[in-house]
Amino acid sequence: MPGAAGGALLVRVTTRPLRPFDRRLPERTAAARWTLLVSIAAGLAGTLLLLAQMTLLAAVIAGAAEGRLRQVPATMLAAVVAIVAARAGSPRWWR
């Protein structure tokens, strides 16, 4: 075993300069980049749907607390139902 009995351990040193990254790296990461963009878009869409659902649901609950549940527009209730359905089915859209 080199270096075990007091002998010198030889290390090979290369003198070529190091590159910041391999030129083949962008080619290999194209698929990962696309997947990352789709994941970010899906997360952003889910976040916006959640914010819209919270806003509309808060308006419906505030109207119910003030005793005007029957006066809440049907379009607002339909929007809440549509957003809940979109959030429930969104992971299946991009599989």
Image (cartoon, grey):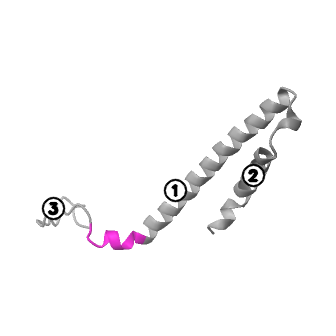
The furthest residue to the top: 66
Quarter of the image with the N terminus in it: bottom left
Q: How far apart are marks 2 and 1 (CA)?
A: 20 Å
The mark closer to the camera, 3 or 1, is: 1
Question: Where 57 sits versus 45, above or below?
Answer: above
Badge 2 amino acid: Val
Q: How far apart are marks 3 and 1 (CA)?
A: 54 Å
Question: Where 30 sits versus 8, above or below?
Answer: below
Q: Where is residue 32 in the image (x, y as percent from the top left)?
A: 45, 67
Q: Position of residue 60 (x, y in %)?
A: 79, 37
* Residue 24 highlighted magenta (yes or no): yes
Q: Along the line of sight, which residue is nearer the eye, 62 or 7?
A: 62
The mark closer to the camera, 3 or 2, is: 2
**Left or right of 90 in this view: 28:** left
Question: Where 63 sits versus 29, above or below?
Answer: above
Badge 1 amino acid: Ile
Residue 40, disc: 1
| x 54%, y 59%: residue | 39
Residues at circles 3 and 1 in contact by the CB criterion of under 8 Å: no
| x 13%, y 63%: residue | 17
Residue beneath disc 3: 8
Q: Position of residue 13 (x, y in %)?
A: 14, 64
**Could you classify mark 3 by the number of other residues whose Cα lies within 10 Å: few (under 14), some (14-19), or many (20 or more)?**
few
Q: How far apart are marks 3 and 2 (CA)?
A: 71 Å
Q: Along the polypeptide, which appears first: circle 3 or circle 2?
A: 3
Residues at circles 3 and 2 in contact by the CB criterion of under 8 Å: no
Disc 2 element:
helix
Residue beneath disc 2: 84
Q: What stretch is highlighted in magenta?
A: 22-30
Q: Along the polypeptide, which appears first: circle 2 or circle 1?
A: 1
The furthest residue to the left: 15
